Amino acid sequence: SDNVREESYTFADLKRQSDKFANVLRGLGIGKGERVFIFMPRTPELYFALLGTLKIGAVCGPLFEAFMETAVKDRLQDSEAVAIVTTPALLDRVPRAELPHLKHLIVFGEGVVEGDGIVDYAKAMAAASEESSIEWVDREDGLLLHYTSGSTGKPKGIYHVHNAMIQ
């Protein structure tokens, strides 16, 4: 298909891009302990966003790209997520009007119209500094917020702390 991307990244590139993303989040006033969800296909930008989120001590919530509006809403509402990273194709599945905590929608893709909380990922990244310090966290601070499938009622958030990485 047309959207296949042949790209490669070094660990240095990954560090640079995730540092930039950390600065994008800090520039939006997002900080330690706040929830940032990622709702996008597995592109390099997903990984830059994930690592950048962790670098500021925020808690990352992954959302499966096949999720429809109700699944997205339940998780964003329950977690009180302040930001989501997504694409123009998936943006319609984010019911913003019903999510008072959701202040920032960082959108990666073509033709992003900024304003009213919508941030153009590419533009924000281009303007962000590569200089970034990591927010110190304790072993019991939050790392990831994964939700159960919801097959036996409402999906429940499973809070993974940084110490879980050691496993």
Image (tube, rainbow, N blue to C red):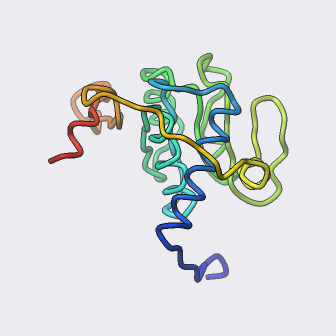
In the displayed structure image, the side of residue 125 where residue 86 appears, left or right: left
Residue at the limit of the structure toward the left, as seen here: 167
Q: Quadrant of residue 116?
A: top right
Position in image of residue 103 (x %, y %): 67, 25
Residue visible at 62% across and 16% down in the picture: 100
Above or below residue 127? Residue 42 is below
Above or below 87: residue 94: above
Give the camera-side residue of 35 and 161. 161
Residue 38 location, x and y as percent?
51, 44
At 72% across and 58% down in the image, what residue appears?
109
x then y, percent, for residue 65: 48, 52
Report the side of 159 relative to 91 (left or right): left
In which quadrant is the N terminus drawn?
bottom right
Q: Indicate the position of residue 60 as horizontal and vertical percent values.
A: 43, 38
In this rendering, position of residue 117 left or right of residue 98: right
Residue at the spot x=48%, y=48% of the render?
Answer: 50
Q: Residue at x 80, y 50 (%)?
A: 112
Q: 88 above or below 154?
A: below
Residue extending farthest to the top is: 100
Q: Quadrant of residue 98?
A: top right
